[in-house]
Image: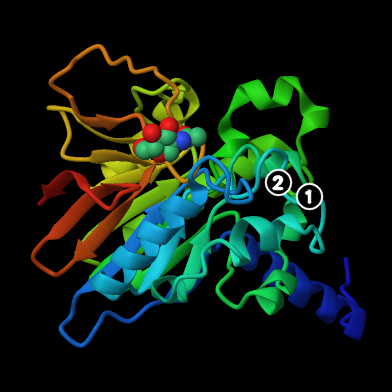
């Protein structure tokens, strides 16, 4: 068969090429460490409740500690807006739960946000929209992406579409951009695996909304244990950080050096639930509100959990 080369065919080939090679890539952002080569950031999760349930108190302490550590940025582990995400880019909840709450001078930094299951109950495109950046320049939310800060690389993973339970109630969630689900998940896992393999950073941290391992009320996520954990184990990831359970915790098992850290104490907490089969592995559990800080150098990582009074509840370093 003779191929007639015309401008439509060439254009089609070029577009096809771009599509194939853009689908398989996580968007990347670059952060520079401080002059002394170190990096510091805060992690908060499960927060957007218009200041209620101690959200404002957590925000105040985040500001004080953030200023003291001269943080580079803030990470949110998702469930950014309760109960059902944002209705649109003009939803007043964006100002009421974010802009007007995290006002401290120590928090005027870039925020890297992932989506939680509650965010998927609203208009997902609204949270991802660059229009929000015009309302508050700190805001950045993507489904999955990479932040490269030289000594440490952060891999943000969209975990909500992994959870089978949410697909039994499909109308409650905004799955546009996710369906068909199977290729979405397999592409995502392939992208994360590739990004981890290509990483030259000393430290690798994976961040998602749902826990892989948790002693909280929601507990461990079977789908992530089956699908994501093998990839992070194979690529010698140092930390997995999540929210979803409204607590602060660290789990460490003897079969792997990975630390499983939960920072989901941004507002409503005190569930009064904790359950883990092996007490030796549950290194720390706090049922109340708070947040986590990470200080990273070429030689070590320092993890500290704070409560709403600014007291250190747990400290761990490697
Ligand atoms: C706010 O925090 C204090 C101190 O931890 C706690 O006693 C109180 O119950 C919290 N309030 C709510 C609504 O969680």
Query: Where residue 88 sits in the image (x, y, percent)?
Result: 82, 57
User: Disc 2 designates what residue?
Assistant: 85
Identify the element where label 2 is drawn: loop
Respond yes or no on whether mark 2 lies under 8 Å from ligand 1.
no
Q: Nearer the viewer, residue 176 or 280?
A: 280
Q: Is residue 75 left or right of residue 33?
A: right
Image quarter where the N terminus lies is bottom right
Residue 17 image-quadrant placement: bottom right
Residue 296 image-quadrant placement: bottom left
- Tell me if label 2 and label 1 are in contact, CB under 8 Å: yes
Q: What is the distance, in whole Å, between disc 2 and disc 1 at their CAs? A: 7 Å
Tell me if I can see residue 200 in this picture: no
Ligand 1 occupies quarter: top left
Query: Where residue 168 sits in the image (x, y, percent)?
Result: 73, 19
Identify the element where label 1 is drawn: loop
Query: Where residue 187 sits in the image (x, y, percent)?
Result: 57, 48
Q: Is residue 35 above or below residue 145?
A: below
Tell me if I can see residue 143 in this picture: yes
User: Disc 1 designates what residue?
Assistant: 123
Name the residue at 60% across, 60% down.
98
Of the image marks 2 and 1, the number of the one nearer the N terminus: 2
Q: Is residue 222 left or right of residue 4?
A: left
Q: Is residue 271 above or below residue 150?
A: above
Q: Is residue 206 above or below residue 265?
A: below
- Disc 1: CA contacts within 10 A as few (<14), some (14-19) or many (>=20): some
Q: Nearer the viewer, residue 114 or 16?
A: 114
- Disc 2: CA contacts within 10 A as few (<14), some (14-19) or many (>=20): many
């Amino acid at each position: 068969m003779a191929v007639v080369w015309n401008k439509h065919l060439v254009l089609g080939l070029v577009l096809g090429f771009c599509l194939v090679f853009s689908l398989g890539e996580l968007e990347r952002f670059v952060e520079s460490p401080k002059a002394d080569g170190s990096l510091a950031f805060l992690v908060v999760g499960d927060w957007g409740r218009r200041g209620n349930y101690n959200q404002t108190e957590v925000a105040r302490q985040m500001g004080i500690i953030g200023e003291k550590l001269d943080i580079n940025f803030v990470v949110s582990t998702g469930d950014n807006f309760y109960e059902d995400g944002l209705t649109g880019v003009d939803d007043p909840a964006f100002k009421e739960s974010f802009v007007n709450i995290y006002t401290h001078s120590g928090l005027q930094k870039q925020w890297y946000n992932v989506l939680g299951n509650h965010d998927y109950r609203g208009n997902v495109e609204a949270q991802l929209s660059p229009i929000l950046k015009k309302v508050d320049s700190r805001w950045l939310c993507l489904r999955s992406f990479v932040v490269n800060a030289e000594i440490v690389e952060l891999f943000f993973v969209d975990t909500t579409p992994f959870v089978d339970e949410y697909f039994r109630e499909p109308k409650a969630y905004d799955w546009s951009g996710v369906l068909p689900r199977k290729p979405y998940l397999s592409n995502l896992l392939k992208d994360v695996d590739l990004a981890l393999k290509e990483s030259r950073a000393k430290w690798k941290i994976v961040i998602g909304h749902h826990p892989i391992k948790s002693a909280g009320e929601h507990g461990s996520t079977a789908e992530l244990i089956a699908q994501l954990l093998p990839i992070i184990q194979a690529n010698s990831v140092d930390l997995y950080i999540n929210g979803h359970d409204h607590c602060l915790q660290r789990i460490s098992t003897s079969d792997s050096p990975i630390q499983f850290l939960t920072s989901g104490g941004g507002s409503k907490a005190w569930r009064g639930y904790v359950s883990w089969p092996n007490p030796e592995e549950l290194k720390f559990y706090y049922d109340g509100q708070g947040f986590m800080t990470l200080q990273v150098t070429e030689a070590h990582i320092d993890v500290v959990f704070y409560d709403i009074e600014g007291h250190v509840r747990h400290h761990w370093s490697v």
